[in-house]
């Protein structure tokens, strides 16, 4: 999809520019706020372990905690010039029960194969990030330190960009909280953990914004973004968090967009005698409103 979007943008940029267009007035450079609310359909992936020398239990093969769940995620973006301040939040919960196919050690107790089990897992996360657009090859000023200029061939009828590509660096903080219980009546195990990790976030984001209204009259523009982060834990335990996301926004009006995407929140961290390795990942869909 990215090559197709860039191709459309290139065709738009190669079109002749009317001399009757107003002077350059980049609406996209003005301060604006985007609020995004999405329905997220993630699954729990990976392993967890309780207690000293605890067995790594796989959420798919050892304990069935792998169902897709309807969850919420949201974002609030404030953008001005080359800067974007972003606040992110999400919540996920799942539960299951069954019998162990193999023996496992949980919270210091050795459970034999066939032992009953029940478990609940909840994870919520909040993050604050700052993005700096380091490179914008089609903008009036390709780099933050570039001299003021004007790419007169890259403008639509309103004076804004026909095509804008941003490569941004990301820095910030993320807090992820996990609460998980594990019970086995036969084995006499009843344990619960609450783990909270604060992490420093570093990453990158690529964004492509194309004005497609000249060729698709009912659609204003298409915006694609993709990014990844790595977040070393600085409080609450040890390890790291990670994230991957990719989104497509179809702007059906000047300030309303339908969103479709994918999000992964990874965890490879420990807190006390609890260890979690894996991710919460899945597709999402929702709405973005711009103010």
Image: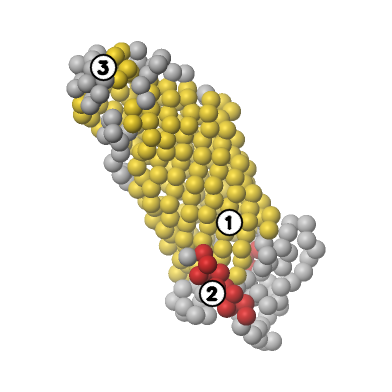
**Residue 288: image location, x then y, percent:** 47, 58
Residue 117 visible from this viewpoint = no
Task: Please tell me in which quadrant of the rendered image residue 187 appears.
Answer: top left
Sooner in the amino-acid sequence: mark 1 or mark 2? 2
Using the numbered discs, state the Cα–Cα distance from disc 1 to disc 3 in whole angstroms: 48 Å
Using the numbered discs, state the Cα–Cα distance from disc 1 to disc 2 in whole angstroms: 18 Å
Using the numbered discs, state the Cα–Cα distance from disc 2 to disc 3 in whole angstroms: 60 Å
Task: Check whether the beta carbons of the residues at disc 2 and disc 3 lie within 8 A of each other.
Answer: no
**Residue 80: image location, x then y, percent:** 65, 57
Answer left or right for 37 relative to 127: left
Mark 2: secondary structure: helix
Mark 3, residue position = 111
**Residue sitting farthest toward the right:** 147
Mark 2, residue position = 8
| Residue beneath the point at 30% across and 23% down | 182
Mark 1: give few (<14), some (14-19) or many (20+) Cα within 10 Å.
some
Mark 1: secondary structure: strand
Task: Check whether the beta carbons of the residues at disc 1 and disc 2 lie within 8 A of each other.
Answer: no
Mark 3: secondary structure: strand
Total labels drawn: 3
In the depicted structure, whether residue 231 falls above or below residue 248: above
Q: How is the image coloured?
A: secondary structure
Label at residue 206: 1
| Residue beneath the point at 35% across and 12% down | 108
Task: Please tell me in which quadrant of the rendered image residue 121 appears.
Answer: top left
Label at residue 107: none
Q: Which of 57/36 is in front?
A: 57
Sooner in the amino-acid sequence: mark 2 or mark 3? 2
| Residue beneath the point at 28% across and 34% down | 61
| Residue beneath the point at 80% across and 63% down | 147
**Residue sitting farthest toward the front:** 102
> Disc 2 vs disc 3: which is toward the camera?
3
């Amino acid at each position: 999809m990215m090559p197709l979007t860039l191709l459309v943008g290139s065709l738009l940029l190669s079109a002749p520019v009317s001399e009757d267009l107003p002077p350059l007035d980049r609406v996209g450079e003005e301060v604006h706020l985007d609020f995004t609310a999405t329905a997220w359909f993630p699954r729990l992936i990976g392993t967890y372990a309780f207690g000293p020398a605890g067995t790594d239990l796989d959420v798919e093969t050892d304990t069935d905690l792998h169902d897709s769940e309807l969850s919420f995620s949201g974002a609030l973006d404030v953008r001005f010039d080359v800067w974007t301040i972003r606040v992110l939040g999400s919540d996920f919960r799942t539960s299951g029960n069954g019998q162990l196919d193999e023996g496992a050690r949980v919270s210091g107790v050795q459970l034999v194969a066939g032992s009953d089990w029940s478990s609940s897992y909840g994870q919520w996360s909040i993050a604050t990030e700052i993005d700096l657009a380091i490179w914008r090859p089609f903008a009036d000023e390709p780099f933050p330190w570039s001299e003021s200029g004007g790419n007169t061939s890259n403008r639509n009828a309103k004076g804004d960009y026909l095509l804008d590509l941003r490569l941004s660096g990301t820095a910030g903080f993320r807090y992820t909280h996990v609460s998980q219980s594990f019970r086995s009546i036969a084995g006499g195990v009843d344990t619960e953990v609450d783990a909270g990790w604060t992490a420093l976030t570093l990453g990158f984001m690529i964004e492509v914004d194309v004005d497609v209204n000249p060729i698709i009259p009912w659609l204003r523009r298409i915006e694609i973004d993709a990014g990844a982060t790595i977040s070393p834990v600085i409080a609450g335990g040890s390890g790291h968090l990670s994230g991957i996301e990719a989104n497509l926004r179809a702007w059906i009006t000047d300030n309303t967009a339908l969103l479709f995407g994918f999000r992964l929140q990874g965890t490879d961290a420990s807190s006390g005698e609890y260890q979690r390795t894996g991710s919460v990942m899945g597709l999402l869909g929702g709405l973005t409103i711009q103010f």
